[in-house]
Amino acid sequence: MKSVALKAYPRSQVQRAEVKKLRTSGRVPGTIYGRQAQPQNIEVGFDEITDLLHHSVSENLLVDLSVENDPRARRLALVQEVQHHPLSGKVLHLDLHEVAETEKVTVSVPVETTGEPAGVKNGGGTLEHIMFKLKVRCLPKDLPEQIVIDVTPLEIGKAIHLGEVVAPAGVEILGEKNRAVVSVSAPRAEEEVAAVPGAAAGAADVEMTKEKKEEGAEGAKDAKAPAKDAKAPAGDKKAEAKPEAKAEAKKK
């Protein structure tokens, strides 16, 4: 990675109100860390750092830092972390880590894919990103802005694992070699999606049939009940007819 020049100034403001006023004036507070020196509070121009980040593929930025009134004319540093405003996205704070040109650094770099997977193009599959960043170790000058993976030959059900990723020259990719980075999953079958409404409809039919049977059974019971009631009046008529017959017989 090619380093870019960045001008910084010593910062004495540490209180919240002071830092807020500093941002209002067009400066961004920051801190530079190093193994051979104590952390130092600095400030940089808002427009300058925003422009550098805008033209960078990732926020892994290697800078030639010059701090005003510092006896060292040049300090090589990596932009380690950038804090943004949650709504506006403006840069609020940045942390830099001083590095040496001859010492390897360990940094996480973003993963990008190129090409259209065969499983997506021909089989309707879906490309899935499992790892969005890879941890690498290398000299600062060899640090890649991103790791590019060609996914063109990837078929459905296949994956590219960490051990299969081709690293740029001078870069070592760290991590478990059998861990999947990207994969292509099979499309969801339309039959499976349609099976749910069908199953629901079948259940509804069963319930409706059951209800009809229950209604039929109740109707049958209701039909039998009046028959029993009908016998009672008939019996009553016979009972009433017997005394009348006896009375007529006596008269005779």
Image (cartoon, helix red, strand yellow):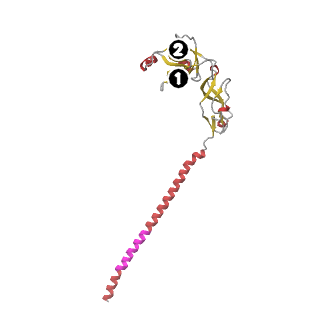
**To which quarter of the image does residue 149 belong?**
top right
The residue under the point 45% across, 64% down is: 219
Q: Magenta stretch: residue 234 in it?
A: yes
**Residue 151 visible from this viewpoint:** no
Furthest residue toward front: 36
Residue 241 image offset from top left, x and y in percent: 35, 81
Query: Which comes sooner in the sequence, label 1 or label 2?
Result: 2
- In the rendered image, the vertical position of residue 47 relative to residue 123, given as above or below: above
Residue 144 screen position, x and y as percent: 63, 23
Region of the chain picked out in magenta, as a range:
224-240
Q: What is the three-letter code of the residue carrying label 1? A: Val
Q: Is residue 173 magenta?
A: no
Q: Give whichever of 175, 23 is nearer the camera.
A: 175
The residue type indicated by label 2 comes to Ala
**Looking at the magenta stretch, what is its main secondary structure?**
helix
**Residue 10 or residue 168, whichever sits in front:** 10
Q: Residue at x 52, y 14 (%)?
A: 8
Residue 82, label in figure: 1
Crowd tier of the residue under label 1, counting other residues whose Cα lies within 10 Å: few below 14, some 14–19, many 20 or above: some
**Which residue has dot 2 on it?**
8
User: In the image, is residue 112 above or below residue 214?
Assistant: above
Residue 60 against residue 162 in the figure, above or below = above
> Can you tell which quarter of the image residue 133 is in?
top right
In the image, residue 135 lies at what x, y percent? 61, 28
Residue at mark 1 to residue at mark 2: CA–CA distance:
16 Å
- Asked whether residue 225 is in view, the answer is yes
Name the one closer to the observer, 2 or 112: 2
Q: Secondary structure at mark 1?
A: strand
Q: Quadrant of the N terminus?
A: top right
Label 2 residue SS: strand
